[in-house]
Image: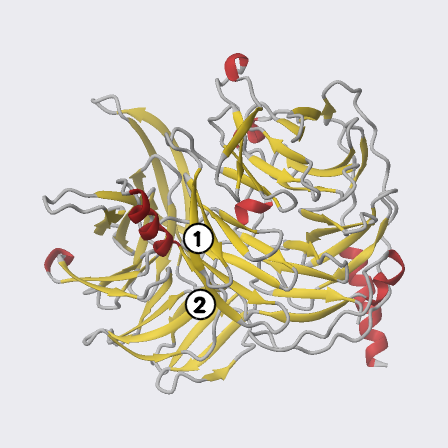
Amino acid sequence: MTRLILSILCVLLIASCSPSITPDSETTIETVSSPTATSLPTDVPLPSPSPTPEFPVRDGGTMQPSAAVIAKDNLAQLTELAVWGKGVIRGINWSEDGNQIFVDTALGRYAYDSVSFQLVDEGLGFAEESSGLSFNVEDLGSSTDSLGRLKRQFRIQVLTDGKSTGSFDVDTPYWPVVTYMPESNIISISKMGDVELRDGTSYEIFYTLGWVRYVFDASDGGGYSFRPDNYSAITVSPDRKLVVTGQFDGKIILRSGEGFNDNLTWQTGTPVRFLSISPDGKKLAAEANGNISVWEISSGEVIGTLPDTFTSGDFFYNQDHYGTEEDLGVAVKENKLAYVNKDIVLSVDLTNGNRSGLVDVKEGSRLDKKEDGKYGHPEYQPIHTMFFSGSGQTLITMLEDRAYVWDLGTNQFAKMIALDKEKQGYGLVSAYSTSNNLLFTGSPAGNYLKIWNVDSGIELPSIYAWDNSGLTNGYDGTHSLTMSPDGKFVFSWSGLEGVASLWEIETQTRVMALKIPRSEYSQYKPGFYPVAISPDNTKLVFSYSLNPGAHIASVYSIPDGNELYRISQFFSAFSPGGLLIASSVGNNRIRFYDSETGNMLGDVTSKYPNKDGFQLLYFSEDGKTLTAVSTNGTISMWGVP
């Protein structure tokens, strides 16, 4: 009886959560008349699936193998076969008495004993919102100083328990990020690299931190180069005698003494994202690459490590992240998922959940510099994204102006491909064709889609994509690239002018162009989501936003550019046979469509909550499993048992 009631409640919940989909008549197609989208059928939830096997929400476990290809007639049996990850970390802190260390994730709170470091409780729900300070930020406008430099001012309004208790102004070129540290009553204001620490009562400046500088190529004469970046973590001791910062290059820096001029540096080797000082000021909990260690501050020694590994990386999508699949720093090849954590790549074996290290850009940078002897190879370089080769034997990591190729048999650096010898571009975007081992790049400032043969490292003739001479803003460039599954076509999305194009690679001709209406929002934040191209190159899913609340997802026919129908999605994937479209539609739901008709076939929902409601979806090559990467920090495998 209980199971029947739960099944009925699940059906009602799915039906009530499914959004209605309304065609938007503003979409126009270049060279063809504006199409009329076909209406979608009413939401019909799938029948309750078979009972889901229980798997731990943590690294480890064994995936139950999938028995059948995912198809229209067996979606009702689709099951979440396995889930890994304890949830992406949201914060680390100590209990008031210092006896426990709390790790707050998107899935809830985990409590560990601060002496034995063993897990003592989990499933504690989410950390209670502090009754301390919150903030409203108001843009006061821009002006110029006496030297003609642009000055922009913001007013930070302080709220205590929801009521205004004061305000202060800050100058910064970009919108400031304001947070509160209740343990030290400090307000932190991040201002484009600089960080201002203010007293939480008087709002007076307590201490100011300048940009992080990753120094490289230091010479005997004292000269050096540096790469600027933001701090990855900041905390202040309860007695305010110690300021501790973390960096993406793995350093933890402790500042103390008069003016905080006494510095002590610890090295973790991997990006540091969370720091917390114990109430007595004697210990520091630090997260680096998903591992949480406890340091004794007086000796600088690690006295313990929490037994669990958490997910730490850059690939988790959110509703404010606009770009393509390649911007996310994640790659899937059959049963292996690789993801970026700033300048390193890790992998998860999807058959057992085990996590391992793959590559470290520092190694590539050192060998790269040794090989060409040139100046300007910073050891810390964030990875934009990466690609598995068609064989799965090599990995290509994309940096700002070069690509590194790695041998996955040995996890060793193999070679470098120079992408932008003159360093004239910015905002690199890329795509990779597994069928012919070609690498494609573009940038907002460039007119061309550049092409490289990865085997030889030789640059091939470029596709002349944009003529910026007649554009209102003088440039349009390339803001995203997506490769067709067979490697015959590449899809590019421009920026301010709102043009999306499909290019035939062999002939370097544009076979289809879509014109997206411009708005003040889309002009500067195009709001597009990853594109999906069907295996037979007859359909394309393209999604964009004209404002934050107007998300549009259309399926177009190739090459005539006719809009076939609208769907609800943030990320879509075609099944290997091309008959199904799987789409992420929010609230950890995956919705399936008949790709020929646009008919909605039903939804399935992950058992672990995700308020951000976004998953990256990847079908296996045999079509038997669907991998879903979720913003809550879990990776799930779906299939028919």
On residue 290, the disc is 2
Helix or strand or loop: what does disc 2 sit on? loop
Residue 5 pos. (x, y %): 83, 74
Q: Nearer the viewer, residue 365 or 331?
A: 365
- Nearer-N-terminus badge (2/1): 2
Would you identify the image quadrant in which residue 423 lies? Answer: top left
Please identify the quadrant where the C terminus is shown: bottom right
Residue 250 pos. (x, y %): 32, 60
Q: Nearer the viewer, residue 148 or 97?
A: 148
On residue 439, the disc is none
Would you identify the image quadrant in which residue 628 lies? Answer: bottom right
On residue 414, the disc is 1
Disc tally is: 2
- Mark 1 neighbour density, 10 Å: few (under 14) some (14–19) many (20 or more): some
Which dot, 2 or 1, sits closer to the camera? 1
Q: Amino acid at mark 1?
A: Ala
Answer above or below: position of 379 versus 531: below
Q: Residue at x 74, y 38 (%)?
A: 540
Q: Nearer the viewer, residue 338 or 173?
A: 338
Q: Is mark 2 in CB contact (under 8 Å) with mark 1?
A: no
Residue 341 pos. (x, y %): 45, 57
